Every structure is written in structure tokens, then in C-alpha cells.
Amino acid sequence: MTEKCGVVGVALDGRDAARPLYYALYALQHRGQESAGIVTHDGFQQHSHVDRGLVGDVFAEGDLEGLAGSAGIGHVRYPTAGSLDTSCAQPFSVSFKSGSLGLSHNGNLVNADEIRDELAALGHAFTSDGDTEVIAHDLARNLLEEDLVRAVKRTMGRIHGSYALTISHDDTVLGVRDPRGNRPLCIGRLDDGYILASESAAIDTLDGELVRDVRPGELVVLEEDGGGFDSYQLVEEDDTAHCFFEHVYFARPDSVIDDTLVYEARRELGRKLWDESGVETDVVMPVPDSGRAFASGYAEAAGETTPDGEPRPEDDDGVEFAEGLMKNRYVGRTFIMPTQDERERAVRLKLNPIKSTIEGKTVTVIDDSIVRGTTSTQLVQLLKDCGAEEVHVRIGAPEIVAPCYMGIDMATREELIAADKDTEEIREAIEADSLAYLSTDAVADVLETDRSDLCLGCVTGEYPYDIEGEETDREVSRPDVGGQTLRADD
């Protein structure tokens, strides 16, 4: 898997927005490393700087100085829809006779091609194959006929899929979350303004205060002087489709998403993992970094009860928590490597075992997921080569059996090891002494929500959106793009 994107928008009282946006993008860098960009507006004209690379490489001091204006939006991207080139880097900017637009998108539309074809037939010229440009063109067209709120509502009635958007319309900044809330977006208060961001960690970086999440189907418009925001509930659905993998893997542990601190959610998932499939070993260790909170909760629960749920005797401390794997932070993620051989080599470069923690001991290793199985196979072998007597693998999420169409660049079914293998077959493939995954019900319990309010497509093969060739997990239909006729009084 590769990360989703990160979006941010700010409106300040007289202070240039570029530097706060820059710092916020740094806080969201984990969500995308392909490109970064900022668009601002100074009340007269729009300014933009977008390029491929990490935030620190894309922006120099002079670039920030050239981004004038107290309102703006930003984006970090990992490509999930669209080409790997600068044309799909964001924010996407467009100027038209009613003003200028900048748009940052986290998510993925499943009907972008239909809307693109319709707009192209009407004379719209597209410069990329990404779905963000489709949203921008559709919104620009609607702004020629409607006010801002109605134009956004009209576009929301046409696009289908997952999206959290920050948008600049001249010097007005707004945020939109799709009607099922698949992608996170939150509101923060700063000393001299307001911020919209994918994660609350960006708000913390600016010494701000988290106000709340943007509600599914809500439009939030920041006041131009940074004095507050207006809210418009444009679409309401009976249920949500929050991406559970935000809590399992993608979000920073210090972020609060949908009222839940990610770190505590992962610790609780780890505790559930012990309750469901705990195994007595000498030591439990995380796969850094995302496995750390799971392993902490797992070890804590192991200190309280035995694997069969009985209370621990007072003289029994349970399973020792230890850091048995050290991560080389200068090695790229293994799933980005283009060939299987390179991915296998990268595991050895990325993780180095601490022999004294492992040699002669039984080990439980905790990770957040198994995708292709490459990393897990290499990891088990690495630990056994280091002298581990047994290696048990526990995963803090259910099996990934299907691809994601909602903005995660996940492997195809042909590449997913769990798509055609059961747990025992996967255990044999990675050569672990035992293997267990967390149940879907446990995830829902920890997040204090019903399964029907989560997007579980990657672990069930049933999706909360109408995707061609796939099953749905609820009643849902794709908008009739050609027949959509929202009027000004809608």
C-alpha cells in the first residue's frame, strides 16, 4: 500500500498564509511524497507553486515569499489516480471568467471518466488524466450559473466516490467532505484564523486547537478575515463509510480522526489482538513504526490475562515488550520498489534485528497488515536467521483480500496474498510458526461504530460506492451525470 494524499487550507487575519501552509504540509508529509504544492490569493490574483518531490525540496525561501495572500490551500500527493508527472501535482489551478480556483483532493472518484467525457464534449480542455481536474472544471462551470454554495452542491450531486477537498475561490477558502465521510478532514482554530486539514497533527504544528471534524456531506467556508467559518450541510446519508485503515496505518498516531486519537485506537486494537489470538512467547516486538502502538497494547493486555482469558498470577508479568528491530529511516518503503527482487533486498536494508533480544527466544512480531507477503516472509526469515526459536506473527487488521478504489494505491487481487489464500496457507507461505489477524468486528468495537458505518471494501470485497464489476455492501447508485439538473432553488 501507498499513502493517500494530504490537504490543507487556511484563512488568516492579515498574515501571509504561505508559511503556515508550508509547516502544515510538513506535518502531513507522511500522507504523500510524490509532489507538494501551495496556492494562495492576495485579493487581486492567485499565486501557485507546485512541483514533484518532498515538501522541503519543493519549496525554497524565495518560493514562499512569492506566494502572497492571507488565504490559501496546500497538498501533498501520493499518486492513486492520474499519471506520475507534474501535470497531476496539486493544488490544481484554473482561471475562468468568474474568478480563479485552486483545488486539493484526497480520495478517488469512480465516475471521473464519465464527467470528463461530458465536459470535453462541451469544450473543456484537460491537461491531466487525474480526477481532481475533473472536479475543478465541473465546479468552475457551475460557478458561472450559481453562487458558491449551490455550485458546490451541484458538483457534489454529480461526482461519485471518495473525496476530502480544500478549495480556494479567489480569496475564499472552503472544505468539503464526501457524503459518506470516507476521507478525514477537520477544522482548527489558530490565533489569527482558521485551518482545514486532513489530520489534526497539522493543526497542532501551528499551535492551533482542534474544533471538530468536517461532517460527511458538509461544506465549510472560512471567513476571509480568519474570524470564523460558515457551515452548510449539503448532503446527508443514512450511514457513513469511514476508512478504517486511517486508524490502522495511514494517519499519524498523534492525530485525532472522527473523535478518536489514532494512537489509543491502535493500542486498543493491539489489546483486542491479544484477546482474540494471544500466544505465550518470551518477547513481543513491533515492526516499526506502525506496529509499535499495536504491540504496546498487545503486551499490556498480555500482562493482565493469559491467552485463555484468565487473570495473570501476581508473579507472572506476561509477555515482555521489546524493540527487536531497528529501522533504517533512509530506505524507501518496500512496496514502492518496482520489482520483487528489489522489495526483498529493501527489507534487509530497512530492518536490522537486535540479536540479544531475539537469539534463543520465542518471538511474537506485530505488524499492521500483510499485503503481498514479501516483507513478512523476509522478516520471519530474518528473525530465524538471528536465532529466534519460534516466530509468531500477529496482524492488527483483518486480511486484505481486495483492492481499494477510494484513494489507496493498493495491490491488485493478483498481488494480494490473502485474495486466494486462507490464513493457514499464508502462514505456510511466510514460514511463521503461527499467524493470526484481527477480526473486523474487533475493529468496529474499538472505533465504537457499526460495521455499516465503515468502508471495509479491502477486507470484504464489498464497497460503499457503485464501482463497476464490484459488489456493494449497501444500497447505493452512481449519479446519472447526463441527467443531473440541479437548479438554483435546490
Image (cartoon, rainbow, N blue to C red):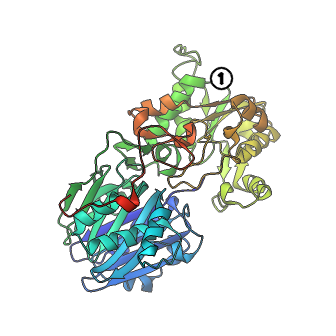
Q: Position of residue 456 (x, y in %)?
A: 50, 40
Q: Is residue 321 above or below residue 226?
A: above
Residue 25 makes an appearance in the image: yes
* Residue 82, picture quadrant: bottom right
Give whichever of 104, 73 is nearer the camera: 104
Horizontal relation, residue 212 to residue 110: left or right: left
Residue at image mark 1: 280
Task: Please tell me which residue is depicted at 54% across the width and 50% down the height of the picture.
Answer: 468
Q: Is residue 218 above or below residue 450?
A: below
Q: Position of residue 234 (x, y in %)?
A: 25, 54
Give whichever of 328, 344 is nearer the camera: 344
Horizontal relation, residue 217 to residue 261: left or right: left
* Residue 177, picture quadrant: bottom left
Give whichever of 227, 216 is nearer the camera: 216
Q: Is residue 433 above or below residue 61?
A: above
Quadrant of the snapshot with the C terminus = bottom left
Horizontal relation, residue 385 to residue 445: left or right: right
Task: Please tell me which residue is depicted at 45% across the width and 43% down the height of the picture.
Answer: 464
